[in-house]
Structure formats: C-alpha cells, structure tokens
Image: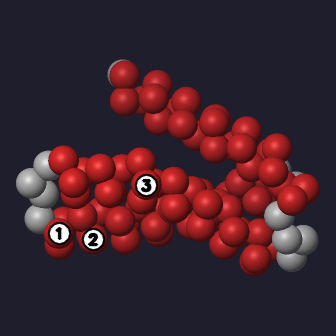
Amino acid sequence: MTSLILTFGVGISLALVYYYIREMLPKETKRRIFFMADLTIGLSFIFFTLPVYLMFNVPLGLLISWFLTTFIILLINAYCLVKIIK
C-alpha cells in the first residue's frame, strides 16, 4: 500500500512540474516529449542510479538495465503527460 501511495505522489509531482514548465518547453509535440523525458531521466540518474552505484555493491549491468528500463517508462510517461496536459 505504501508503494502505491508513493508512486501516486511521484506521478502527481511530475504532472505538476510539467504543468508549470510547459510554457518554457518547445512548441512541437515530439520535442516537448523528449525534453520532458530528458528532464525526468536526468533527475532519475542523479537521485537514483548514481547514488545506488556509489553506495551499494550492485553490478553495473543491473544498473544499466534499470536505467534503460526507467528511460523507456519515463519516455512513455512524458508522452502521456504531453497528450493529457496541453
């Protein structure tokens, strides 16, 4: 239950971030999607992937797999945000 609540909170916060920065993003849809995805992927790398690599003994291949999976999920998330919030 806690994971569901935290995931919902993160989703709402990403939607709010997009809502407030959408005027500063490029106007064409494809560039807007990739810009938002790059922003969230950069934050994911700084706040998850890099600390996990530095603090825990996790194999590099597993981290790369997690990062690529997260990239795909966040790209789909950015697509949905751009289509829902215009």
Q: Residue at x 58, y 40 (%)?
A: 11
Q: Residue at x 30, y 63 (%)?
A: 66
Position above or below: 1 against 61: above
Q: Nearer the viewer, mark 1 or mark 3?
A: 3
Position above or below: 80 against 38: above
Question: Observer-nearest residue: 61 or 52?
Answer: 52
Report which residue position mark 1 lands on. Answer: 60
Q: Residues within 10 Å of mark 3 (few under 14, many from 20)?
A: few
Tell me: 42 left or right of 64: right
Q: Position of residue 22 (x, y in %)?
A: 84, 55
Q: Residue at x 43, y 54 (%)?
A: 46
Q: Residue at x 24, y 64 (%)?
A: 63
Residue 3, quarter of picture: top left
What SS does tag 1 mark?
Answer: helix
Question: Quick check: can you spot residue 75?
Answer: yes
Tell me: 40 left or right of 18: left
Gap between marks 1 and 3, in whole Å? 16 Å
What SS does tag 3 mark?
Answer: helix
Mark carried by residue 43: none
Q: Position of residue 34 (x, y in %)?
A: 66, 72
Q: Are marks 2 and 1 in contact (CB under 8 Å)?
A: yes
Residue 29, quarter of picture: bottom right
What SS does tag 2 mark?
Answer: helix
Q: Earlier in the sequence, mark 3 or mark 2?
A: 3
Check disc 2 and give the amino acid type.
Ile
Report which residue position mark 2 lands on. Answer: 64
Q: Residues within 10 Å of mark 2 (few under 14, many from 20)?
A: few
Check disc 3 and give the amino acid type.
Ile
Tell me: 33 left or right of 46: right
Report which residue position mark 3 lands on. Answer: 46
